[in-house]
Amino acid sequence: MNAASRRVVYHAAVLYISVPESTMDLFSPRHLLVILLIVLVVFGTKKLRTIGSDLGAAVRGFKTSMKDGEHEEEAKQLPPASSTAEKPSDKTTPS
């Protein structure tokens, strides 16, 4: 390791140690941007577009099936309309 490399490693270590814990958050905008760039380089935009559309279709399908399940549950809870419902009789009661 030459002197320039040691200097870079030393400065990186000093910066890492001197940065407060609160700014080393995993979900800070800077970290998210770096992660996004790495993902773009690894997968490419076309592959990410395909993955995004597949994920969206899966979420839509899940929501649709959940709604269908709720409608089936509501249908099971409602009593069926019977054709032998009690009808008022024509008989008069004695008074």
Image (cartoon, helix red, strand yellow):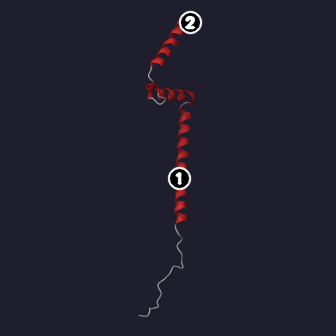
Which residue occupies 53% across, 39% down?
52
- Mark 2 crowd level (few <14, some 14–19, many ≥20, 10 Å Cα): few
Secondary element type, mark 2: loop
- Picture layout, residue 11 above or below residue 66: above
Residue 46: % across, % down: 55, 34
Which residue occupies 53% across, 41% down?
53
How many numbered badges does the structure rendering display?
2
Which residue occupies 52% across, 62% down?
74
Secondary element type, mark 1: helix
Query: Which residue, given by chain and number where applicable, does mark 2 sit on?
Result: 2
For the residues bearing labels 2 and 1, Cβ distance under 8 angstroms? no
Furthest residue in direction bottom, as rendered: 94
Query: Which residue, given by chain and number where applicable, does mark 1 sit on?
Result: 64
Q: Which quadrant would residue 72 be assigned to in this image?
A: bottom right
- Picture layout, residue 68 above or below residue 93: above
Q: Quadrant of the N terminus?
A: top right
Query: Which mark is drawn over residue 41?
Result: none
Residue 7: % across, % down: 51, 9
Judge by depth and name the residue closer to the eye, 80 or 64: 80
- Mark 1 crowd level (few <14, some 14–19, many ≥20, 10 Å Cα): few
Q: Quadrant of the C terminus?
A: bottom left
Give, as a three-letter code, the residue at label 1.
Answer: Thr
Furthest residue in direction right, as rendered: 1
Instruction: Tell me the mark number nearer the camera, choosing from 2 and 1.
Output: 2
Which residue occupies 48% across, 27% down?
31
N-term mark: 2 or 1: 2
Furthest residue in direction top, as rendered: 3
Residue 77: % across, % down: 53, 65
Give, as a three-letter code, the residue at label 2.
Answer: Asn
Residue 32: % across, % down: 48, 29
Judge by depth and name the residue closer to the eye, 6 or 49: 6
Give the alpha-carbon distance from disc 2 to disc 1, as whole Å.
62 Å
